[in-house]
Image (cartoon, rainbow, N blue to C red):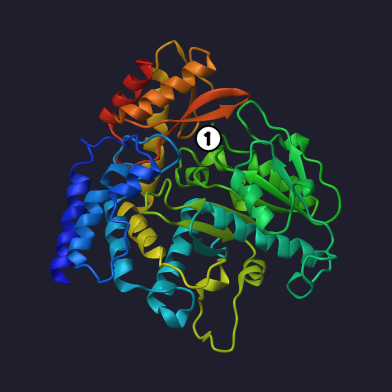
Amino acid sequence: MDELLSATAALASEYLAGAGARPVARPVTLGEMVAAIDSTLPDEGVDPLDVVRDLARNVDPGLVLTNGGRYFGFVEGGVLPAALAADWLASTWDQNPGFFALSPAAAAVEEICRGWLCDLLGLPDTWSAGFTTGAQLANFAGLAAARHHVLTEAGWDLEKRGLFGAPPVTVVVGRERHATIDRALRFLGIGSDQLAVVDVDDQGRMRADGLRLGGGPTIVCAQAGNVNTGAVDPLASICEQAHAAGAWVHVDGAFGAWAAASPALRHLTDGLEQADSLATDGHKWLNVPYDCGVVLCARPDAHRAAMRLSADYLVRDGERHGSDWTPESSRRARAFAVYAALRSLGRRGVARLVETSCAQARRIAERLPDHIEVLNTVTLNQVLVRIGNDDERTRRAAAAIQRGGATWLGTTTWQGWVAIRISVSDHATDDAALETLVQALAEN
């Protein structure tokens, strides 16, 4: 075991040390990757040391360097050293935070992180928290709590009677919502016919003056951090109107909610503390390893009622059971990495991480040549650009940059145009990485 772990640590160190010289991604097909990896199940087992060494060598051409500072495609955070080390230990300890009896240590760390996150994001300390795979399931859990609450208020026992025959639930969403909201609602039995879509402004923010809230069970889905522009919905106005109408407000803050941790940027998320539930990611701006999302809820009773797992054989001693707060039962102890990231950064370090990414995004926008148009007002870490006012040229540029491997950018569609989306969220991004990005764009 000592030899195996030492060799594995050496492989990891070698990968990280070589990050500056690696291509961010290589053109490779699924068939080529399957052929490169030993894909025949052996009759007899292979020595674990050989397995790990072969795996590291064979998968290398298909690894995407999202944690080396030069990846600007999707909102992919890097990995802080303390979070990486804690994640290794989480696998070593093999803890299951589903129930207190399975891991008092994991339960305690989740509870500590809950308090720290509430503090950082300006939320009341009474909010509950669950640690999920990502914002998809965090959105699901928050919206499940919302569904429970609004139906209970309407006199319907959802857990006993199910959805059949229940009062219809209206869900108010912005036109520029993230796709995970629709998917989470679909999981919850809420279809597109039940959505009331509100128009957005030129940055993708929900227009609060377009809210039309009538009677009946209603959930409003707001957004902190538009995936293309980084814009944040006017949360305070949305919450005020929604609560006056008896509606629940859920905020999808996968990355944008972290602006609340910065004194300089907190004003962008004014009203976040008035929401009823919030979904965010740790593996984005907090820079912990995949996978890690967090759902936070102002109404713990509704949160627990929607998620709670109970059976005769399950011991419920102790004060925190992870399965009360997430859709999962057995799961990875993700909070160890969150704890390590937050403690290694501290309150000021988290703020610096967020502020630095935003400053880098502004610098990118300022340094681009004239033939590249910046389509958004850069308020957070997103820069949306278009090359030569031409869809095909923009597509070709992105494809060429991806093939080149020096950096990585992805395309999107914004207001009917093809655009390139630049996301800055890795603590390892430095001046050299910014120069590489700007040069790659300028050459196309």
Front-most of residues 384 and 127? 384
Category of crowding for the residue at label 1, using alpha-carbon neighbours closer than 10 angstroms: few (below 14), some (14–19), many (at least 20):
many
Quarter occupied by residue 210: top right
Q: Give me the residue at 40% from left, 40% from top.
A: 425
On the question of residue 298 being in view, the answer is yes
For the residue labelled by badge 1, is the local secondary structure a helix, a strand or a loop? loop
In the image, is residue 346 above or below residue 422?
A: below
- Furthest residue toward left: 3
- Return the x and y of residue 1 as percentages of the image width and height: 17, 72
- Return the x and y of residue 215 as percentages of the image width and height: 86, 52
Q: Give me the residue at 72% from left, 61% from top.
A: 147
Q: Is residue 213 left or right of residue 19?
A: right
Instruction: Report the label total.
Output: 1
Q: Give me the residue at 15% from left, 63% from top.
A: 6
Front-most of residues 85 and 33? 33
In the image, is residue 438 above or below residue 282?
A: above
In the image, is residue 426 above or below residue 399?
A: below
- Return the x and y of residue 212 as percentages of the image width and height: 81, 41
Q: Amino acid at mark 1?
A: Gly
In the image, is residue 357 above or below residue 321?
A: above
Name the residue beneath numbered marker 1.
230
- Return the x and y of residue 431 as percentages of the image width and height: 28, 29
Front-most of residues 365 and 92? 92
